Image: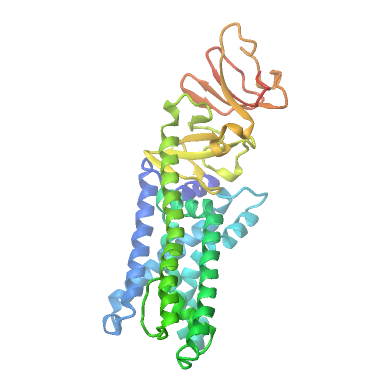
Amino acid sequence: MIDSKRKRLFELIQIGSRSDIYSRLCDYIIIIAIIVNITLLVLDTFDTVLSDCAVLDFIEYITLAIFIVEYICRIITADFLYEAKSKAVCRCKFLLSFNGIIDLLSILPYFLPLLFPAGFIAFRVLRVLRVFRLFRLNTQYDAFNVVFAVLNEKKNQLFSSVCLILMMMLASSLCMYSLEHNAQPDVFKDAFSGIWWTVSTIFTVGYGDIVPVTLTGKIIAIIISFLGVGLVAIPTGIISAGFVEQYSRMKTLSTASENSDLRFIHLTIEDMHPWAERPIHALSLPSELMIATIIRSGDIIIPNGNTLIKVGDRVVLGAIEFKDDIGITIYENTITENHLWNHQFIRNINLDDQSVIVSVLRRGKSIIPNGNTRIELGDIVTVCTKKNHLC
């Protein structure tokens, strides 16, 4: 009974689906609390607004109470989010996770001044960390997850472009220092003065507090300006291309069930499905397969390891990188009356070491098979196998 109530509490504080009204209501309450709290944080910078305003203080205490209750609930239900031998380990995992640390840091600034009155001014700066709660609102949906996915996918290219910019900045600063130091010893005092000029020039800030005065310096400055515009545009182009690729991929995956390409498999999560209400990192999948996307109530979700599979989700399985050279083949077997697998338990089916049955479609419902699953007449059995090892 207690576990079932904790499970329901976990469903309420997680990002809800459209079918769960109460879970969505909890989402809206938390969103409103965050927005109100951050609004008060902004108003707090105006002394004339919040001075001796009991109503606004009371509202802030209410939002703080909501954050504390949510934080406690997430600790209590952490064992439903993580797979571990004990509840204590799961709770420690949450406390040390990014979301857990952000939750804690968004609450601590209220209490640290009470414990350490001498550091009141310093601790108030930590209240800015409440802004990071905004990044938790959409971790399972497109809005932020697509951004993180693009940055992660293009991290090598972005790192290379940033290195080029840093090299350009260093070379430019040393060059301008050499050309302008004698003419302006008070302006170009050292290499750092050249770096400041380079940053304001390359990134087109153009403060004008440091400018070259020699003819050679001006010519070099013109060249650096043109090169800087081109270099700064490289990361922008990489990120833009990444967004186009990501949304094109999402569009392809969302329509994968209508395609004949069996590199994509659609599974509908029914009641009592072994994947229901489990995070992706706790699932056992063949190494050649990955969960590419989840379609939930019309929303396309780019999953991560902590994304929960819910009843009613359409899960799209895909071959890694979706290429033909990965060395696997996914195919379907329709079970006829004379098929060798008809009425056989999967554990008794003679499959080689290179093949695995990943799903069974029976009367329109997807079944994640195990050794005790019996294949029946009319089933559509999906098999993942290494190339040249077809059954």
- For the point 41% across and 56% down, the residue is 137
Percent x, y of residue 146: 44, 50
Quarter of the rendering containing residue 54: bottom left
Give me the residue at 62% from left, 22% from top: 373
Question: Residue 292: image x %, image y %?
Answer: 51, 39
Quarter of the figure with residue 379: top right
Q: Residue furthest bottom?
A: 186
**Residue lying at the far left of the rendered structure:** 48
Q: Nearer the viewer, residue 173 or 150?
A: 173
Q: Residue at x 54, y 49 (%)?
A: 306
Vertical side of 37 occupied by 349: above or below: above
Viewer-proximal residue among 56 and 219: 219
Q: Is residue 110 visible?
A: no
Q: Nearer the viewer, residue 73 or 51?
A: 51
Can you say which quadrant of the picture contains the C terminus? top right
Residue at the extreme top: 338
Question: Which residue is drawn at the image coordinates 56% and 55% (left, top)?
Answer: 156
Left or right: residue 269 versus residue 85 is: left
- Which colour scheme appears in the figure? rainbow
Q: Position of residue 368 (x, y in %)?
A: 57, 29
Q: Is residue 314 visible?
A: yes
In percent of width and height, residue 2 lies at 54, 48
**Measured along the vertical axis of the image, is residue 156 above or below residue 173?**
above
**As drawn, 208 above or below 343:** below
Labels in figure, total: 0
Image quadrant assignment for residue 285: top right
